[in-house]
Image (tube, rainbow, N blue to C red):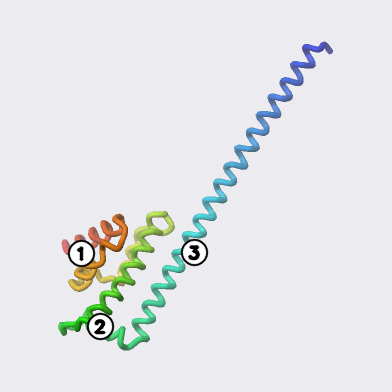
Amino acid sequence: MTRAELKDILDGASFVAIIASLVFVGIETRNSAEQAKLNTQAVQISAYQDLMDNIAQLNALAVEDVEVGSLLYKGFRSSEALTDFEQFRFDRSLYLRFRHGDMASFQFERGAIDESRLRSALQILNLSHPMVKESWLRSKDNFVKPYRDYIDRLIAEETDV
């Protein structure tokens, strides 16, 4: 075998080795990207579960705490006016509910939940109620623009119905 033939064989083997290493790097990159995607999804699902736990705790508070439960009843169902202190507590309760909705909206934006789940998380707000709308107007500047726009759109839909 001549020196030129040996050089050509070695060049061919080097070329095959380079191609093989590039294929291996490509496979590893794809696997790493898939693992990162799965990890992100697991974190999002965990955050959504935390959100649902917080909403359950908030609901339990309203049911177990007679004073808060009666305040919410008075605010939503009664024509009796709230005192300033009751209005403050009512607004704080709604603010927490809006905050939970904000977290659900964040999960929706990240693709962790679909819109039906987001709307389900927001059902507790009763957006058609005038006191909820007033409370939203007082507190909406505390939230990010995409969430404000979404809630405003839902309130407009409630008004149109």
Q: Which residue corresponds to mark 2?
A: 73
Residue 110: x and y, percent?
A: 41, 54
**Which residue occupies 69% across, 24% down?**
15
| Circle 3: element type | helix
Q: Which residue corresponds to mark 1?
A: 158
Q: Which of disc 2 and disc 3 is earlier in sequence?
A: 3
State which quarter of the image contains the N terminus.
top right
**Which residue occupies 65% across, 37% down?**
24
- The disc labelled 3 sits on which kind of residue? Ser
User: Which quadrant would residue 73 be assigned to in this image?
Assistant: bottom left
Q: Which residue corresponds to mark 3?
A: 46
Report whether 134 appears left or right of 53.
left
CB atoms of marks 3 and 1 within 8 Å: no
User: Which quadrant would residue 81 be assigned to in this image?
Assistant: bottom left
The outermost residue toward the right is 1
How packed is label 2: few (under 14 Cα within 10 Å), some, or many (20 or more)?
few
